[in-house]
Structure formats: C-alpha cells, structure tokens
Image (spheres, rainbow, N blue to C red):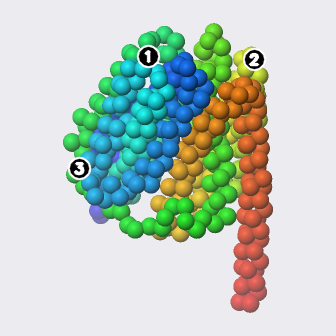
C-alpha cells in the first residue's frame, strides 16, 4: 500500500513571501489613514486629503491592469521588488512638506507600487503552493494580509495623535523596505500569463451589475478610511480609531460568514441585505456627535461591506467560464480600488462645500441607489433559475 505525502503549505519561499507581503501591506494600511490627516492639516484641507487617496487608487488600478505583462517579461522577483520599492520608498519624502503637490505626487507613485505588489503577491502564492492545497494556501495568504488591514487604519489614527508625522513616515518606510530582503531568496520563475480578453470590453449586465454594486460599496469604504478621522473632533480622534478598528475587524468575519451561507443557499440572495446593512451604517455616521451612532454605523457597514465583498466576487466567478477567471478577478479588484479612489476624491469636494454630515448622507444615498441593480440582479437570477428548471423538466418528460 502506498501513501501520498502531503506537501506543506509553509515552505521556505511561501514564508518569505508572507513576510514581504506583511511589510508592504503594513506600510500601505498604516499610511492610508495617516496621509489624509497630514494633507488635511495643510491649506489644501479636505480636497487635498481626498486627492491624496484618489491619486493613489488611480495609479493602483492602472498598474493592476498592466502587472500581468510585467510578470511575463520580468519575472516574479523583479516585479515584486519593484512594487515594494515604489510603495515604500516615497513615503519618506512626505517628511519634506504636507503641500498638496508633493502629497499627490508621492501618492501616485505609491499607488503604482501597490497595484504591482498586490497582483504579484496573489499570483505568486498560486505558484508556490502545491496545486492540491492551493485554496488553503490562498486562504492563509488572505489571513496574513488581513492583519495589516485590521490594525493599520486605527493604528494610523492613534499614532497621528501621539507620534510626530516624520517618525511615522520613517518607520513605515523601513517596515516596507525590509520586505526587499526576502525577494532575492524567492524562486526566479516567470509568470505563465496567457492572452486574455480585455477586462472591461464587452461587459454584459450579468457582470456589470455586481461590479457596479461592489464599486458603490468600495466608494463608501474609501470615504470612511479617508475622512472619518477628519470628520470627528480632535478630542474624539480615539473614537475614530475605535470605529475603524471595529469596522475593519468585522469585514473579514462577515466575508467568511457570507461565503459559508452562499455555499449553502446561493450568493445572490445575500446581495440586497449586504447593501442595505452598509447603507444603514453609513447613514448612522451622519450623527458625528454621538459615539454610539458612529460605532453602530461602523458595525453595520463592516458587516455589509464584508458580506458584499464575498457575494460580488462569487457572483462574478459564477458568471464566467473557467478560462475567464482572471478577468473576473481583475473586474473585482478594479471595482474595489476605483471605488476607494472615487469615494475619497468625491467626498473631499462635497465635504468642503456642504460639510461632513451631508457628505455621509449622500454616500448613504449612493448605496441605496445601488439596491436597484441588486434587485434587478436578484430577479434576473431567479428568472434564469426558473428557466433552467423548466428546461430540465421538459427534458425529463421527453426522456420518459
């Protein structure tokens, strides 16, 4: 009798990749809330804070679309090193000035690095982990990547009140660049990239609806990450840190729970509740003077956003052929990062003109509008299921 030896997930290259990824993502998520606070304290105000995040996410989505070609030409090690370098090194330049021109320029370069970095990391995991344990390996990678996301946003807000900005920028630069030490030890392989359809070309309603809905959810996420620390008073900055910690902690839990339910009852039926929860949570934050309302709002938004992440991704994968899984993944990531940027830039102009409460109310309205395509998608999914059931019944009758 022969026994098959189970290949380990945590092989040496995988551990090195996890360390590099943790450093890069810690740099990204810590500064995601710090840079708007830094820029918002200058003459640029809310507009500058929004432009900082918006510029970063613009270059992120552009480089995400270009990253596969870079991987095919240069290989994983070179592209991962390039991504880490562009993401982390420019952070140190922010010490020079909070001027909007410098902050936006640095954000553009860091966004390009982030776009390259996240695409390379996810693809390399699939290469390093044994094929029979790939799903488990991707899950482990997701858990490691979630830690900086959960802790980074609130930690950045807290540090901004207790540590000089120059110290934060110096430390986060070092943390990000330390990951470069692991890159030369990774395998020198080149990505196997096949020619695929352009991501946004010929997008049908079945793909467009979940993509647009998730974009709306990401818009609200970009608003909170950028402006919640600015919206509360300086004395309530701890409240913003706690609220962001609650929200970021609930997102992965809600995402996992939604996946468990979707596997048993279908993803489409969770879409409307997810959007409603996010919209209700966003509307609660209109009452910025009430700590209870802010925390409750972040609880509801965290649940809705986390569930929406899973549901929309599952729906996209369900609606494409296996050969187009790469396109579905690119659509989801494009919606996420584009939404973050749109939310940050758009809210900055609204808040500057009308104030934070009106801005949060309008953001909630955007989410409520997103329920319309969610309802249409539910009806379309039900109609398709009914047609399939009718066709199956007709086939059984003819066979009998």
- Please say if 32 is above or below 17: above
Residue visible at 73% across and 43% down?
367
- Residue 171 visible in image: no
Residue visible at 64% across and 66% down?
204
- Secondary structure beneath disc 1? helix
- Please say if 210 is above or below 295: below
Residue 290's disc number: 2
Q: Looking at the picture, how far across and down is residue 190, in whole percent?
A: 27, 57
**The N terminus - image quarter:** bottom left
**The C terminus - image quarter:** bottom right
Residue 229's disc number: none
Query: Which numbered disc flags the more N-terminal residue, 3 or 1?
Result: 1
- Residue 387 visible in image: yes
Query: Which numbered disc flags the more N-terminal residue, 1 or 2?
Result: 1
The number of numbered discs placed on residues in the rendered structure image is 3
Residue visible at 50% across and 20% down?
38
- Asked which quadrant contains residue 216, the reply is top right
Depth check: give the residue in front, 389 or 152: 152
| Cα gap from disc 1 to disc 2, whole angstroms | 28 Å
Q: Is residue 258 left or right of residue 365?
A: left
- Secondary structure beneath disc 3? loop
Q: Looking at the picture, how far across and down is residue 306, in whole percent?
A: 62, 41
Q: Is residue 197 left or right of residue 246?
A: left
Residue visible at 51% across and 61% down?
199
Q: Which residue is mark 3?
A: 187
Depth check: give the residue in front, 52 or 83: 52
Residue 165's disc number: 1
Say few, some or many: other residues with alpha carbon within 10 Å of mark 2 (under 14 / 14 to 19 / 20 or more): few
Q: Looking at the picture, how far across and down is residue 37, in whole percent?
A: 54, 21
Q: Looking at the picture, how far across and down is residue 294, in whole percent?
A: 71, 23
| Cα gap from disc 3 to disc 1, whole angstroms | 37 Å
Query: Which numbered disc flags the more N-terminal residue, 2 or 3?
Result: 3
């Amino acid at each position: 009798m022969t026994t098959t030896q189970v290949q380990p997930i945590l092989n040496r290259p995988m551990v090195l990749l996890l360390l590099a990824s943790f450093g890069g993502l810690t740099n990204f998520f810590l500064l995601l809330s710090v840079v708007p606070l830094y820029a918002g304290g200058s003459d640029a105000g809310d507009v500058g804070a929004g432009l900082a995040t918006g510029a970063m996410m613009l270059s992120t989505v552009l480089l995400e679309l270009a990253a596969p070609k870079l991987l095919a030409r240069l290989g994983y090690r070179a592209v991962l090193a390039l991504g880490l370098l562009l993401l982390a090194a420019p952070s140190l330049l922010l010490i020079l000035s909070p001027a909007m021109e410098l902050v936006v320029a640095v954000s553009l370069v860091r966004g390009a690095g982030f776009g390259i970095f996240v695409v390379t990391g996810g693809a390399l995991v699939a290469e390093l982990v044994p094929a029979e344990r790939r799903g488990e390996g991707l899950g482990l990678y997701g858990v490691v990547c979630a830690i900086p996301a959960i802790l980074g946003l609130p930690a950045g807000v807290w540090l901004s009140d207790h540590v000089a900005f120059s110290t934060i920028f110096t430390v986060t630069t070092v943390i990000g660049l330390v990951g470069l030490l692991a890159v030369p030890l990774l395998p020198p392989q080149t990505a196997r990239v096949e020619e695929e359809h352009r991501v946004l070309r010929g997008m049908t309603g079945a793909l467009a609806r979940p993509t647009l809905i998730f974009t709306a959810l990401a818009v609200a996420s970009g608003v909170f990450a950028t402006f919640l620390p600015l919206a509360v008073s300086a004395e309530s900055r701890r409240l913003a840190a706690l609220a962001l910690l609650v929200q970021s902690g609930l997102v992965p839990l809600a995402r996992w729970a939604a996946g468990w339910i979707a596997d048993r009852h279908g993803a489409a039926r969770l879409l409307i509740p997810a959007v409603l929860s996010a919209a209700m949570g966003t509307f609660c934050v209109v009452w910025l003077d009430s700590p209870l309302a802010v925390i409750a709002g972040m609880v509801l938004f965290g649940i809705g956003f986390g569930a929406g992440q899973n549901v929309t991704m599952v729906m996209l994968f369900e609606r494409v052929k296996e050969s187009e899984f790469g396109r579905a993944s690119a659509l989801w990531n494009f919606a996420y990062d584009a939404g973050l940027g749109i939310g940050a830039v758009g809210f900055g102009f609204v808040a500057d003109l009308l104030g934070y409460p009106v801005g949060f109310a309008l953001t909630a309205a955007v989410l409520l509008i997103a329920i319309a395509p969610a309802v249409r998608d539910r009806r379309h999914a039900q109609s398709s299921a009914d047609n399939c059931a009718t066709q199956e019944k007709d086939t059984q009758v003819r066979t009998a």
